[in-house]
Image: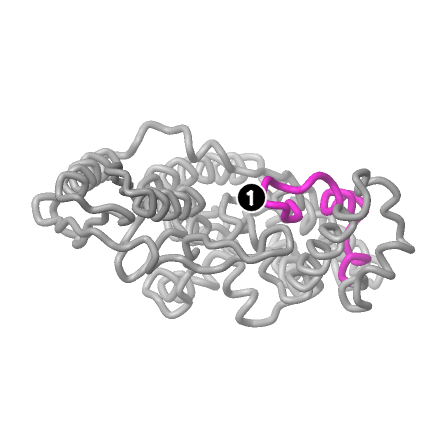
Amino acid sequence: SASNANACLLAERFAAEGLAARVVGVPKSVDGHLKSEQVELPVGFDSASKLYSELVGNVMTDCTSSRKYYHFVRLMGRDASHLALEVALRTRPNLVLLGEEAAQQSRTIAGLVGEVADLVAERAAAGMEYGVVLVSEGLVDFLPEVRNLLRELDGALAERDAQDSNSYEGLSDDWLSSALSPPAFAAFSLLPEGSQTALLEERDAHGRVQVAKLESERLLGELVELELERRAAAGSYQGRFSVQHHFFGFEGRCPPPSNFDATYSHALGLAAGGLVSAGASGVLATLRGLTGPPEEWAPRGVPLTSLLAAERRRGRDVPLIHKAAVDLEGAPFRTLVSRRGGGRGARRPG
C-alpha cells in the first residue's frame, strides 16, 4: 500500500514539474489487503496462501501423528485476515481466530482465551489432547480494548520521542499509568511480561508500535495455559496441555509463483505497458474477470487517488492505499462459518 501511495505522490510531483515521466502501479500484496471494487486480487496472494496451506497441512499431519501438542499458528496479515481465512478454508483447523470477526463482536482477550480453553477442555474430555489453532497476525490489534491501548501508546511514545532522544529508557509502570487512560493501562497489565516488553521496544519505520512483536499465538498460548491451570485447580478440567508456537510470515514472499500469479503478473505487465504507452500516469494497472480464463481478462487503469485513505503515522495523517479487511458478509467467510463445529471435535485437523 505504501508503494502505490508513493507512486501516486511521484506522479503528482512529475506532473507539477512538467516532466514527461509516467508512473503506473500494479496491485501487489502478499497478505491480500489491496482489494476493492476495482481491484479483484493483488499479485502474490495466491502463491503465499498456497505455501502457507502446505506448511499448515504439514503441521496438521505431525499433530495427528504425535497426538501430544496443540499448535498455535500465526499467519501474516496485520491489517487484514485474508490469508488466515484462505488457509483455514483449505486446511480446516480445529479453530481459526480472525481479527475482523473479533472486532465485530467486540471480543476481549479474556473472551478469546476462554473460547480456546473451552475447545481444549472439550477435546480432552473426548481423549484428544492435541489440535491446531490458526490465528491471524493482527488478531490482538483488532480487539477494541487493545486497539485503544495501541492508539494511546503510539501517541504517548511519539510525545516522549519529541521530548527525549532516549525515549525507550525508563518506561516505568508509574510513567505508563500516568500516560495511559485507566482502561488502556488495565489492558496493558493483562498482558504477560514478555508481551509488555515487546510493545515498548523499537517501533517500525512508520513510528507505530510493532504489533508483529506482540506474538499473538504465544500470548494466547500462555494465557490459555494459565486459564487451564485455574480450571484444573477448581476441578473443572482434567487433561494435559502442551503447546507449540509457529509464525509463518515472510516465507510467503519467497516461493516460486503459482501458475495463476505467473500468468497474472505477465498480464499486468502488459496492461501497465499499455497505460504508459497511452500517456497515463498516476494510475494502477488492474485486470477484471480473474475468475475466467486469462484470454477474457479485461485491462483497466484505476486512478490511484481513488484508492487513497488517511492513516495515522507518527502522530500525523498520511495518505496510504486503503487496506481492505475481510468481508464478513462475503462468500469465503460465510463458507467458513458453515463449516464450524465439525473441526472442534475432529480427530484429524483438516
Say which residue appears at 68% left-offset and 64% top-offset.
148
The percent coordinates of residue 240 (x first, y second) are 72, 47
Say which residue appears at 60% left-offset and 49% top-offset.
128
Question: Left of 315 or right of it: where is 256?
Answer: left
Magenta stretch? 187-210
Q: Nearer the viewer, residue 18 or 126?
A: 18
Question: Left of 218 or right of it: where is 334?
Answer: left
Q: Image quadrant of residue 183?
A: bottom right
Q: Badge 1 local density, few (<14 within 10 Å), some, or many (20+)?
A: many
Q: Nearer the viewer, residue 128 or 179?
A: 179
Q: Is residue 189 magenta?
A: yes
Question: Left of 252 or right of it: where is 39?
Answer: left
Q: Is residue 204 magenta?
A: yes
Farthest residue to the left: give it.
295
Q: Secondary structure at mark 1?
A: strand
> Residue under circle 1?
73
